[in-house]
Image (cartoon, rainbow, N blue to C red):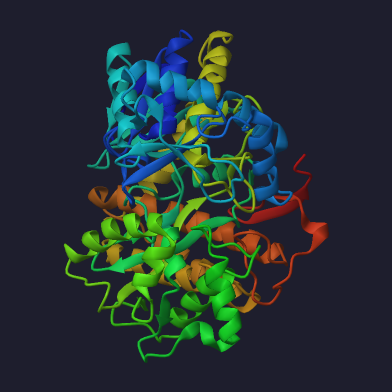
Amino acid sequence: MTKQELWFDVVVIGGGGAALRAALSACGSGASTALVSKGEAGRSGATYYSVAEIGAFNVPDGAMDPTDSPEAFYEDMKDAALGTASLPLCEILARQAEDALRYLEDISGGQVFSKTDGNFRVYQACFSKKPRSHVVENHFKPILRALREEVKKKGITVLNGLQAVDLLLADGETGGVLAVDRDGEALVIHAKSVVLATGGASRLFRQNMYPADITGDGYAMAFRAGAQLSNLEFIQAGIGAAYPFINLFGNYLWKAYPVIRNAEGTRILRAWGESAERQAITEKTHFPFSTRDASKLIEIAVQTEINQGRGTEHCNMLLDFLETDFPKLFQEDPAFHDMWKITYQWHAEKGIDLYRQPMEISCFAHAINGGVLIDSQGCSSVPGLYAAGETAAGPHGADRLGGNMSVTCQVFGKIAGNRAAERAKGMGQFPDIHPAETAAREGLRMHLTGYEADWEGLLASLQQKSDGALLIVRDEKGLLSYQAFLRDLWGQLEKGCAPESLQKWLQIRNLAQTGQMIAAAALERKESRGSHYRADYPDLDPSLGQMLLIQKKDGQETSCHWASAG
């Protein structure tokens, strides 16, 4: 393993919207800056991966409702969090959202946000009481295009194809990162500050709406470095079309009162009675699963049927509109008619006639609301380590407003990059990470055993177990069984790998580490709150309206403790 080294004031790990914004902020503050991405920066990560025709970006600028304000935005975030978000971070997000929009408008020449007659197109998204979600067509690709061009203009160093292995510490402070290329060759990158912006970990699940490179790298590296994480038990998940293509299931479609059946033809919501079935569908006004209303029965029923093996050959449920009186619905709701024409044509082009055929649906993991706990400066509990975007925790809680993740990436990407640069400029020489580097290289060398396993099969097994234990329906028995599975998986990973499989091995390790943290948090939170549902503790416990913090204890074991979210 040859010796390769680079030096930068700030290193940003990631290639999506939060990472690019952090790099631009750090560079703009006068710091020598590098982006380290295992894919192609600006063309990878969750921001680039389209799962719908539009993306949402929340800004309380009164574009549709002049009574909207940062104060109203803050209150919506507070209500959605159910006591588990950092309120100072919510306030920062509410105050700085419009600046984030203006920045993207400036660098793109007004090409990011959709407009009609010069006015922003805006709608009301999940858990919001005001319409403030600004439309980005083609999901979030226009945001990345604008940021990518700006990174190029500023001459920021971009290091693609590098998998970050671990953070390198000097006297408990961040001093760099060890990374490997696709051939397994190691590279040490010295840095006075590091920003983690690697996205979430929804590839932990078989059914997910994320690209293959979202593997919990930031969570796992921060955990191993001793940082505090929080709110990992809160995972956005919801109903989506599952076969022959994957797509979000439009909220408006519930107005047609579709029927959900298992492969045996049984109406799965009828187990709670006809009135409960109708109430669940009536209250389904948000994409993500939440225990806050009766719509929770939809995802609980779907995931339970799948877990118990009553799905189709593709392990999905069947949803149909065969009982819907469409002429009557079109007459009563012209807006539904306009949207339905688009949806019907979309499915027809893919071979599904929604008037006559069922569609296959499933529960899909989406964003994780928790992550590395940051303060108002984007700094973690480890000096010199910052986080932004889905990697960071704080501004989201038990539930999250639709359209908040994209704006969070920009607001806290800017803050983290700026603060990381200020710290770097205030330091003299680079931290001495030689002891940490030696230990990390030796650990890596020991795992390069040449052993070859069925890595895709191992990942599929992890995903299947995660679906059963962590996705929607959780209970003590399942969580303990999952932890036992992870212990066996660690034994498999200890056998090592060949150099050409090292990146895959590292990603599975990071997913397993993240799964371990999620399971520990889910076990500790003995209640149901927002997106966290315990079948054995189905009610909300008022005393648990707090953040649950996770930190490394002995070895790789986790320690959980409660903290006020104020």
Closer to us: 44 or 445: 44
- Residue 112, by quadrant, is top left
In the current view of this chain or complex, which residue is farthest to the front? 331
Closer to us: 512 or 501: 512
Pick the quarter of the image with the N terminus: top left
Q: Is residue 95 left or right of residue 402?
A: right
Question: Residue 297 at x, y = what percent?
Answer: 57, 74
235 relative to 268, above or below:
above
Please name the residue shown 55% across and 22% down the image.
Answer: 415
- Residue 450, by quadrant, is bottom left
Q: Is residue 207 left or right of residue 369?
A: left
Question: Residue 542 at x, y = what percent?
Answer: 81, 60
Please name the residue shown 52% across and 57% down the image.
Answer: 286
129 relative to 153, above or below:
below
Q: Is residue 30 left or right of residue 544?
A: left
Instruction: Evaluate whether residue 139 shows in this view.
Output: yes
Pick the quarter of the image with the C terminus: top right
Closer to us: 300 or 226: 300
Question: Residue 458 at x, y = what percent?
Answer: 34, 67
